[in-house]
Image (spheres, coloured by chain):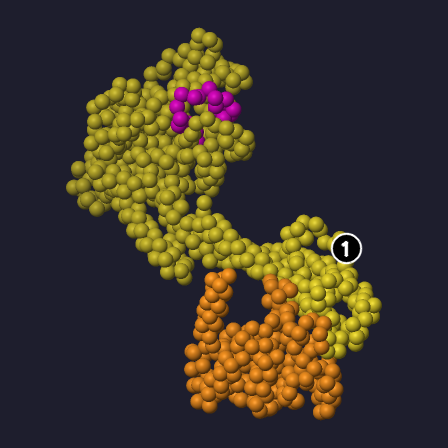
Amino acid sequence: MLKFKILILLSLFFTNIIWADEPYVSESLLNEIGEKYKIFAKKRFFALQQTLDSVKGKSDLEKLEAVNNFFNEVRFASDMKVYGKKDYWASPWEFLGNDMGDCEDYVISKYFALIYLGINYEKLFFTYARSTKFDEPHMVLTYFETPKSEPLILDNLNRKIFPASQREDLTPIYNFNGDMLKEIDKENEKAHKKWDELKLNMQRKKI
Amino acid sequence: MTLYKQTALMLSLFLLIILSTVLVLNFQSANKGVQDRLYEDAKNTATSLSLSMGNANGNVSIMSTMINANFDSGNYRNITLVDVDKNTLYERKSESEIKTVPKWFIELINLKAPTAYANVSAGWNQVGVLHVQSDTTYAYKQLYTILIDLLISFAVITLIGLTTLNLLLHTVLIPLKEVQKQAAAITRNEFIIQRKIPYTKELADVVLGMNNMVAKVKAMFDKGNEELKAQKELEYIDQDTQLKNRKYLIDRLPAYLKVDASHEGGVNILIAISGMIEANDKIGHQNVDKLFMDIADIFKTHTKNIKDSIVARINGTEFSLLLPNCSSSDALRLAKSIQNSCKSAIGATGLDLNETIISIGIYEYNHKNSIAELFAHSDNALSIAKFNYEHENIHLEKAESAVEVMGKEAWKLIINKAIEKNRFSFVSWSVIDTKAKKLAHNVLSIHLDLDKHTSYTYAQFMAPAIQSGLCSNVYKKVVTMLFKNSSMLLGASIYSLRLPHEYLEDKDTYHNLSELLRANASMLPFKLIIELPDKLVRQDSKNIREYIELFRNFSIEVGIFEFIGEGGDYQYLQDLRPIYIKGEGSYFLTQSDQSLSALRLITDTVGISLIAVSVMDIETLGKLKSRDIHTVQGYVTEII
């Protein structure tokens, strides 16, 4: 029994080493980000990696807290201001590289960081919502512990994570998870127009 | 296969491959477009329906109603709502068969409508995932219409393309057709110079090369023609009187003294003028020469109405007037008239008629006489005339009349009977090419078979036939027999048949021959050469051209017989291009080297071979070979 425990511990240790060896942003991509967005951007990615590393192996809630807090430090700016477009879904590298973005960009970066930390994609949804406070369309990342449990809201307007029932300033409109839709029909290359564009940009390492 | 066909086939194939590829690509593109459209429709429905279902707060009956409303109003194969535990909450499925397009088309295309998915939520909570799949019926119908349209367009474009290609190729290859025509003409020894030089460089080079070659060959022919003309003038014309000479008479006599001669006989008038040495002394050479010119004119004037007559100067003071079909009494009247005219001419010069005497020997010849006999009897008659003062130096000698087995009327009866009863048969003898040591062809001759035991040769019956005016009828029968019963001649692959001018000049012959050839020429089991008399061919008349064209149309070659190169111009040989020329062996042997080489230049240029006939012995054959005449006909072919 002791030998079995040691074996499990060793395997967990090595898994940890292998996991630790795979950073959220690869070395080469980091260099490219450094060249494009200068040294401070690179430092932000180091800080991100530190944040992510600090919650590895911890509970989903701790991971949600860490990721939500980290990205909510990024400044809000419209797509028109940052990218010259009315609506653009930025990759996590563009978002942190520019150090600014709109609500979708926060959701995207938080989603992929949480996936990196090992959270099941089926628990996370991009939720189209309406901000009753600003009377504007908005998007938040929702976390479902189980498919039928009350979701937690990761928002950039209200920086703290609250259960959905406590977010009366938001009216939910539509939940969406590109990975989930993709998983139903793997042969189909299309799932959602914006999502498909985003995935393509990420494949191409667009920064 | 012609270049046109090869190119047309290749380009047509190329065009068809391109058009087929375009057709397939177009259809594939349309197919993909339709499939994309199917997905987009499904996706739009899935998204809009899932958004609407968000207002149902998770109430399955409301959501089912929404699904029903969508499913019934649109073209969907399937709409399914699956909850978060992957259980089906509601499903609508269309099971209808596609009937608007043929079954083979559905099996061929096998269209798969992709399914679109959308998350369905109720407030913050998840309800599940909505599956939407469009119905392919409309897509199949649309694709089938596209395919039919494409096929129609393809057929029209192919038709237009192939027609244009055909026209273009035809235009591009027009110069090549001209080149081909010129090349074919060269093969047939025709001299065509192409004036229109093609714009395609390669073809232009070929045309220029062929033009150059043709020009050179034509120049050679013209040179040969000129030389032969000059030689003939020297050889056959008396330079003082411009009358024909003794050589001409000798070369022409075989045509008069033969079994199938056109005329049974006639007279040969030998005229001698004595006392010319004294005349020279008295009035001088120039006046004597003028006197001879005047006398020559008198001869010409007196004989101009006698068909086929020959007036020749035999030597310095003797002249020969060969008058076929002329009776002795007519000859005597003519001789007296000539003598009187000559006397007047002599008297006009101031010469004494007792010293300058005109003696006339008349020999009434028969076509069965030999040349030697004709000259011997004519000389004899003249010798007697010179001393026949009683009859003003004119003497008539008649040929010993041959003992005829049958009279003219009896022959006429036999020949008419033979024509009526079909009593002719063919015999043949060989023409041998002694150089190649092979049979050149077989010459056909005709026998008249009286009964099982008696038959007459061509030599025996043809003379009375001609004299009775039955020659044409005999040949009409024989030629019909040749074409209709050709199977009886299976011994050789090439036969030749002489057609006499009596038959060819008959007004019905051309029509009869045309009918015969049209009906039977294609079934002839051998190659046929029709021999035409040079006398007729050299006139180069419309009539003879029509005959030659008729024969050539039925792949029958034409040869020439009884050639003595009498014509002033040999252009007709180039124009009519006979396969060979047959002349008497003696004719070829008596020609000067220059004359023969000029003839060879002409015949070689247009690919005509020379054949010597009536070659009787090995010695003559040897002489002919030394003159480069190797193909012979006659008794000698039996002994070599």
Q: Is residue A127 magenta?
A: no
Question: Given the image, on which type of amino acid does mark 1 rest?
Answer: Glu
Can you give x and y, in whole percent of width and height, for residue A149 in the image? Answer: 71, 74
Whether A84 is drawn above or below B131: the answer is below
Q: Colour of chain B?
A: yellow
Q: Is residue B166 left or right of residue B142?
A: left
Answer yes or no: is residue B514 visible: yes
Residues shaded magenta: B480-501
* Badge 1: residue crowd in 10 Å (few <14, some 14–19, many ≥20): few
In the displayed structure, A9 sits above or below B96; it is below
Residue B9 screen position, x and y as percent? 50, 50
Residue B495 among magenta residues: yes
Shade of chain A as shown in the rendered figure:
orange
* Residue B30 on image: x %, y %: 63, 63
Above or below — where is B574 with respect to A173? above
Left or right: B12 in relation to B355: right
Classify mark 1: helix, strand or loop. loop
B373 or A170, which is in the foreground? A170
The percent coordinates of residue A185 (x first, y second) are 63, 63
Residue furthest top as drawn: B453
In the displayed structure, A140 sits above or below B618; it is below
Question: The numbered mark 1 sits on a residue in which chain?
Answer: B
Left or right, residue A147 beside residue A85: right
Q: Tell me what residue is drawn at x 71 percent, y 82 percent.
A: A164
Residue B170 visible in the snapshot: no
Name the quadrant containing residue B335: top left
Which residue in the structure is indicated by mark 1?
B95
Quick one: B509 or A55, which is closer to the camera?
A55
Q: Residue at x 57, y 60 (%)?
A: B25
- Residue drawn at 39 percent across, 23 percent down: B492
